[in-house]
Structures are given as C-alpha cells and as structure tokens.
C-alpha cells in the first residue's frame, strides 16, 4: 500500500494538483487522499480509486503497455510497485 500511495502522490504532484484540489475534483476527501498517499487505507473502496484515477488520468500508471516496442511505461510501473 505504501508503494501504491507513492504512485498516487507522484501522479498528483506531476499534474500540479494539491491534495485539496484533487479532493475537490474527485469527490474523495482530502484526508482520505492524504492517508492513501501514506499507505494507510488498505480497505479503500474501489469507486474512490476509480474517481481519483479519472482525475489523474495517464499520470497514474496502473497497467503495462500492450504494444511491442521499447516503452518506459512498463519499467516505470514495475519499478514503482517494487
């Protein structure tokens, strides 16, 4: 959960959003986002993650590139989840 929280934090910061702004746009409370970024909400509802992911868009890599080419996306995602 801590590694996933770091992904959320990095994605949020790369979009230039504060926790408060992400909360306003996603409908998920700022305190929940703060706890998520620190890895303190292991039972977070899926719908909240979907709403946060919708706001962060491509900045939040949750999958691997399906194409057959040299791509930084799989390496970034794999490195971040370790």
Image (cartoon, rainbow, N blue to C red):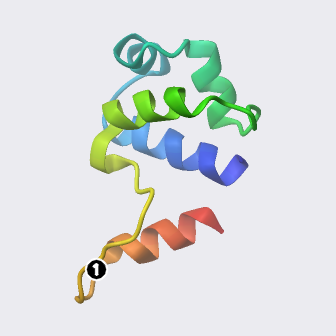
Q: Residue at the location (38% across, 15% down)?
A: 21
| Percent of width and height locating residue 68 | 24, 89
| Percent of width and height locating residue 80 | 56, 63
Q: Please state which of residues 53 and 21 is positioned toward the viewer in this rendering.
A: 53
Task: Label 1, secondary structure: give it.
Answer: loop
Q: Residue at the location (73% across, 32% down)?
A: 41
Q: Residue at the location (51% across, 34% down)?
A: 49
Residue 47 against residue 2 in the figure, above or below: above
Residue 18 against residue 67 in the figure, above or below: above
Q: Quadrant of residue 56?
A: top left
Crowd band around label 1 with a 10 angstrom C-alpha radius: few (<14), some (14–19), many (20+): few
Number of on-image labels: 1
| Percent of width and height locating residue 36 | 64, 32
Residue 80 against residue 60 in the figure, above or below: below
Location of the C terminus (image quadrant): bottom right
Q: Which residue is mark 1?
A: 71
| Percent of width and height locating residue 45 | 62, 29
Q: Residue at the location (41% across, 27% down)?
A: 51
Residue 82 against residue 57 in the figure, above or below: below
């Amino acid at each position: 959960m801590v590694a996933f929280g770091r992904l959320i934090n990095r994605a949020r910061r790369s979009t230039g959003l504060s926790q408060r702004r992400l909360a306003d746009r996603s409908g998920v409370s700022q305190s929940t986002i703060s706890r998520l970024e620190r890895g303190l909400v292991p039972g977070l509802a899926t719908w909240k993650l979907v709403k946060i992911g919708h706001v962060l868009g491509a900045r939040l890599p949750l999958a691997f590139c399906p194409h057959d080419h040299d791509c930084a996306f799989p390496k970034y995602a794999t490195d971040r989840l370790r």
